Amino acid sequence: MSSVQEFLQGITKSWIHQSWSVRLLRLWLGVTFTYAGIDKALDGGFLNPDATTYIGKQLAGFAQQSPISPLLNKMIEHATLVGAGTMVGEIAIGLATLFGVLPFLAAVAGAGLSATLWLSSTFHTTPYFLAPDTAYLIMWLVFALAILPRKRTISRVLNVDRRGAIGIGVVGVLSIAFAGLGNIFAKPGKIASGAAKVVTKQGGSAPANAIATISDLNVGTALQIKLASGDPGILIRTATDAVCAFSAVCTHQGCTVDYDQVSKELICPCHGARFDPLQNGKAIAGPTRVALTEVPVQISGEYIVSA
């Protein structure tokens, strides 16, 4: 019997020897995590530091309220590597679950990733049952307990036989291949506002409430500012004689929104919430219906000032 035939037969047997309830759970988790990784690969902005959906911006948004913010701040320093690892890791966990390759370890890894996502992005979701990551954490733990061998020897848990070695190779190659192909065919990411800086008063003649000079801000562009509270804000010039400003803290989970010059909307990179600056920061899409906090600003001579 060839190695390929042995591997394929092993996959079939792994499904046959499980109850329907375990099969259903295994199918859902395997397909969902594989899709989650491929979906990230197909997002051209996920690994692009200039895009609104860049993983680094997501981590920065999560870190503002997460109980593991010190860890997330460390991850931001290597955001692209973290993003690529998450992408490939999700695909690998999903495929390993579907193929029955080291299934217990795959379940533990899935539970660990779900727990990390919960602590990062949905820890403060109220009520708690609206946070999907907690549901996936429990599902992975149930699946792990369901497939844990009765004789818990290392060889049984790790399944370190020839088929297991072949399976690890197959899962590894396919995970990297799927991630690579996804990036090749990915849709271009939406590029964030060009100037990402904290704006300060310009020149000694600037009024006390000056935020920026008109020359700092072309029509249809935005500048990141720092509010008096210390929170991030965003200043937008919507017309030659019109400006507006908002708190950049998303009203869903506290991530930092950015201005997309193409759609002329404020977009949250974490969960896709969208806000319309021309409607006083009204939430127009995504998981929140609460508008961004508007900051009163106006044009005064050559300066944009707080009103």
Image (tube, grey):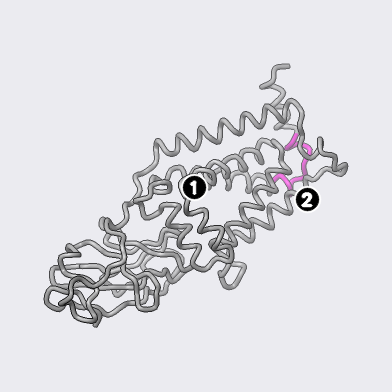
Crowding near the residue tagged with mark 2, few <14, some 14–19, many ≥20 C-alpha atoms within 10 Å: few
Residue extending farthest to the right is 151
Snapshot quadrant of residue 249 = bottom left
For disc 1, the neighbor class at 10 Å (few under 14, some 14 to 19, many from 20) is many
Residue displayed at 39% across by 45% down: 44
What whole-number distance in Å separates the C-alpha atoms at marks 2 and 1? 29 Å
Q: Position of residue 168 (x, y in %)?
A: 66, 32
User: Circle 1 — which element?
Assistant: helix
Q: Quadrant of the N terminus?
A: top right
Report whether 200 appears left or right of 126. Answer: left
Please name whichever residue, 138 or 205, is drawn nearer the observer in this view of the structure.
205
- Residue type indicated by callout 1: Gly
Contact (Cβ within 8 Å) of mark 2 with mark 1: no
Q: Amino acid at mark 2?
A: Leu
Q: Is residue 146 left or right of residue 107?
A: right
Figure quadrant of the C terminus: bottom left
Give the residue at mark 1: 83
Span of residues in magenta = 14-24
Q: Is residue 123 left or right of residue 26?
A: left
Principal secondary structure, stretch drawn in magenta: helix
Q: Decide which of 301, 152 is in the foreground and name it.
A: 301
Most foreground residue, 141 or 192: 192
The picture quadrant where one finds residue 8 is top right
Sequence-first disc among 2 and 1: 1
Between 140 and 214, the one lying in front of the other is: 214
